[in-house]
Image: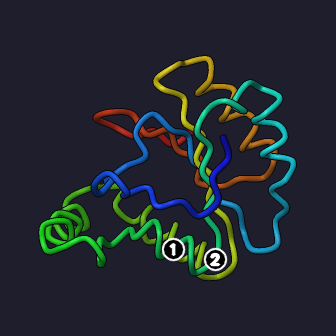
């Protein structure tokens, strides 16, 4: 099911989109074909989140500004020690400049991960990342 600018933190702050493949699309890039491709590949019953614009950036809340001191503290630590912490800053910048971020959840299924990666990349996504439970991987 495609959700547009959902609140991923409705059940508590989601630090990472675990078991999802994400892709960033530059401002002006068309994304309807991505959603169609994901649907045709069997993701129509899966969770697919689309974030765009300032509303999408506020909903993603990569800095944890709207989720209390513990989340902000943890995000600050990640920013100092995690090699890939800048991905959250790039996501926010992409959204605030008119771009789009799409997350396709795979539930850990390797075949779905590979297929989602292929669809996102062939549609022009950059910064395509798979978010595992303990690591993330640039695809």
**Mark linked to residue 49:** none
Tag 2 secondary structure: helix
Viewer-proximal residue among 1 and 104: 1
- The quadrant of the picture occupied by the N terminus is top right
Residue 32 location in percent, x, y? Answer: 85, 53
29 displayed left or right of 61 = right
Residue 34 location in percent, x, y? Answer: 79, 46
Q: Which residue is mark 1?
A: 57
Residue shown at the point (54%, 29%) measured from the top left: 106
Residue shown at the point (58%, 39%) measured from the top left: 47
Instruction: Report the Cα–Cα distance between label 2 and label 1.
Output: 6 Å
Residue 97 placement: quadrant: bottom right
104 displayed left or right of 134 = right
- The quadrant of the picture occupied by the C terminus is top right
Identify whether 130 is placed above or below 127.
above
Q: Are marks 2 and 1 in contact (CB under 8 Å)?
A: yes
Q: Which residue is mark 2?
A: 53
């Amino acid at each position: 099911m495609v959700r547009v600018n959902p609140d991923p933190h409705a059940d508590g702050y989601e630090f990472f989109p675990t078991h999802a493949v994400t892709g960033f699309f530059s401002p002006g890039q068309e994304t309807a074909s991505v959603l169609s491709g994901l649907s045709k590949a069997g993701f129509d019953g899966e969770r697919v989140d689309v974030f765009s614009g300032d509303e999408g950036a506020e909903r993603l809340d990569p800095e944890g500004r709207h989720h209390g001191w513990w989340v902000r503290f943890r995000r600050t630590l990640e920013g100092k020690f995690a090699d890939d912490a800048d991905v959250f800053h790039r996501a926010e910048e992409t959204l605030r400049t008119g771009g789009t971020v799409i997350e396709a959840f795979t539930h850990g299924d390797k075949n779905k991960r590979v297929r989602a990666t292929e669809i996102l990349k062939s549609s022009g996504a950059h910064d395509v990342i798979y978010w595992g439970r303990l690591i993330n991987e640039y695809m």
